[in-house]
Image (cartoon, rainbow, N blue to C red):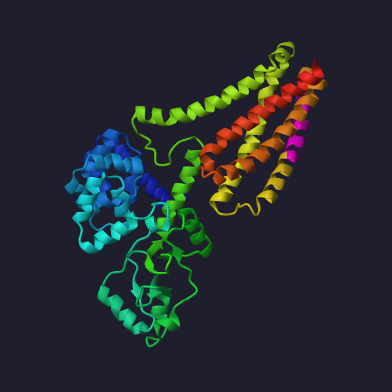
Amino acid sequence: MSNDKKESKDELEEFMAHLRDEAHGDARAMLAELHPAEIAHAIESLPNVERDTVWQWLAADVRGAVLSHLHDDVRASLIREMGLPQIIAATEGLDTDDIADILQSLSDQDSREILESMDRQNRERVEQVLSYPDDAAGGLMNTDAITVRPDVSLDVVLRYLRLRGELPESTDKLFVVDRDDGYLGVLRMAQIVTLQPATTVAEAMASDFDAINVAMPETDIANYFARQDILSAPVTDDHNRLLGRITIDDIVDVIREQGSQSLTSMAGLREEEDLFSPVWVSTRRRAMWLGANLLTAFAASAVISMFDATIEKIVVLAVLMPIVASMGGIAGSQTLTLVIRGMAMGQVSTANSRRIMRKEVAVGLLNGLLWATVVTGVVIFWFKDYGIGVIIAVALVINLVVAALAGVTIPLMLKRMGSDPALGGSVLLTTVTDVIGFLVFLGLATVFLL
């Protein structure tokens, strides 16, 4: 952990300690020194009573910046306690995309009133962002892109920037457009200050810098930023007209949300769920997921019940059968996780899915043979039964191969159906590995041992 991260963590822990000790004076003094993102993190880590106390301490201009860093559920809960004048004050000075995120937490009527309170130019910019899905380039972009024409000199551009007095954050390049705002290329800030003043923008610009289409999904945008190693990129419509720009801070948020969503989706939770949401709300959200898992458990139990006579005669099977299902579940989860990660990064497609499947099946087969040998030795040593040792070995190999196949095919199938692979994949995988594991192990025991 770097020194800056350690110091930031120590500050937050000290702030939380002041709150616990009701040393509100010290807590408020520390709060004034924290970055809005750190304040948001602290608020999300607090129970509702302390959260409300801290929120009341914040000035209106700070509240807006903090709201832009909060997860949806927490942001919505705080906004519900604010009056409309307070919300209007909090949104003043925020970036267009941040204002759009806050408005999406409000009722239609409140959103309209806040939009009407803005000047015409800002209102049109926010309405433009709101017209696009929030998980696409249009919902992520900011409309504060600085544009220049190709026929002017760098000296004119530099004078123009000085007249502006202040540049938008993360401005590393300007965007070159024609008279109809058609995108032509980018002019990097380094070019402006290093080339001769008489050089024209057309001579200095990079015309091969691809723009992002306004409908591009945020996952593809994050991958594009990672591949190109850039700080900002232009956003254009289907007619190549410049609409705005996306900056690296927006992409960092996307990557963080995607990582969190992948983790929570596998447990059936929403990425933005509040850690301190009401008990009833959390219970209701998780109940459906538990119900889905209950169905898979009943499916596995139904398979086991088909062989109850076998288990009654050979009781040791009941001791050993969880091993087969568990090993298959772990192996399948490893493959499933790698494939979902590859899909998120754009590395898995129909073009290479067969090769991935062959590789994972080979890994499953080799791991199956390895651990089947180990388990067979343990079973023979433990129960002095060579027949059961061989049967569990065969069942392990088959289940690990099936788990590898399922780990590749399930997320691809769910994506083709338009579902989230991370959300439904683990349930289906568990069903497959449990059912196949029990069916093969108990079926072989019934055929060869009775």
Residue 390: x and y in percent read 80, 26
Residue 443: x and y in percent read 74, 22
- Given the current orientation, which residue lies at the most extreme bottom position? 198
- Given the current orientation, which residue lies at the most extreme left position? 85
Q: Is residue 391 left or right of residue 89?
A: right
Q: Residue at x 39, y 49 (%)?
A: 7
- Relative to 245, residue 348 above or below: above
The picture quadrant where one finds residue 388 is top right
Residue 15 showing in the rendered view:
no
The picture quadrant where one finds residue 27 is top left
Residue 55 showing in the rendered view:
yes
Pick whichever, 446 or 240, lies toward us: 240
Q: Which residues are magenta?
A: 365-379
Q: Is residue 170 left or right of residue 116?
A: right
Residue 429: x and y in percent read 60, 35
Residue 167: x and y in percent read 31, 69
